[in-house]
Image (cartoon, grey):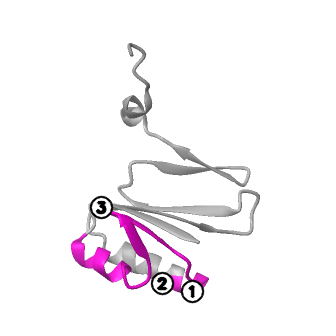
Amino acid sequence: MVVLILERAPTSLRGELTRWLLEPQAGVFVGNVSAAVRDRLWEEVKCRLRGGGAMMVHNAANEQGFAIRIHAQAARTVEDFDGLQLIRIPAGNADETKIDEQT
């Protein structure tokens, strides 16, 4: 299983990805492809992104059962803690995750 999330991606790149993956929501692609196809798609995304950001989550033989790849200007980063991949949200984006306590 592969999940690919694009931010500010060219329409032509999104169209190319729909040949291999489904796009249930704008910029979100899901599918089940071989590791070779997955890696070639990732290389294509990195080459054609032009200023946007990309995140790929795919099956892997590790404790979590998946791996995360991030390229370019994605809003979040992946941190590896002794083989455990966690997402770091930059301090400037922390306000997006706060729950409004007044409601």
Whether 88 is drawn above or below 22: the answer is above
Spatial separation of the CA atoms under disc 2 and disc 3 = 18 Å
Residue pictured at 54% horizontal, 71% vertical: 2
Query: In this picture, which residue range is highlighted in magenta?
Result: 10-37
Question: Disc 2 marks which amino acid?
Answer: Arg
In the rendered image, which quarter contains the N terminus?
bottom right
Q: Mark 3: give few (<14), some (14-19) or many (20+) Cα within 10 Å.
A: some
Q: Residue at x 29, y 79 (%)?
A: 15
User: In the drawing, what numbered circle is on residue 52?
Assistant: 3
CA–CA distance in space, label 3 to label 1: 24 Å
For the C terminus, give its image quadrant: top left
Question: 17 or 95: nearer the eye?
Answer: 17
Q: Is residue 71 magenta?
A: no
Return the residue at label 2: 40
Amino acid type at image mark 3: Gly
Q: Residue lying furthest right in this view?
A: 63
Query: Tag 2, which secondary structure?
Result: helix
Is 19 left or right of 30, judged from the image as shown?
left
Asked whether the residues under the numbered discs 1 and 2 touch, taking CB atoms below 8 Å apart as contact, a structural biologist would say yes
| Residue 74 quadrant | bottom left
Q: Which residue is mark 1?
A: 36
Q: Amino acid at mark 1?
A: Ala
* Residue found at x 72% / y 55%: 83
* Residue at x 47%, y 40% (from the top left corner): 89
| Foreground of the two, 60 or 25 | 25
| Farthest residue, direction top | 102
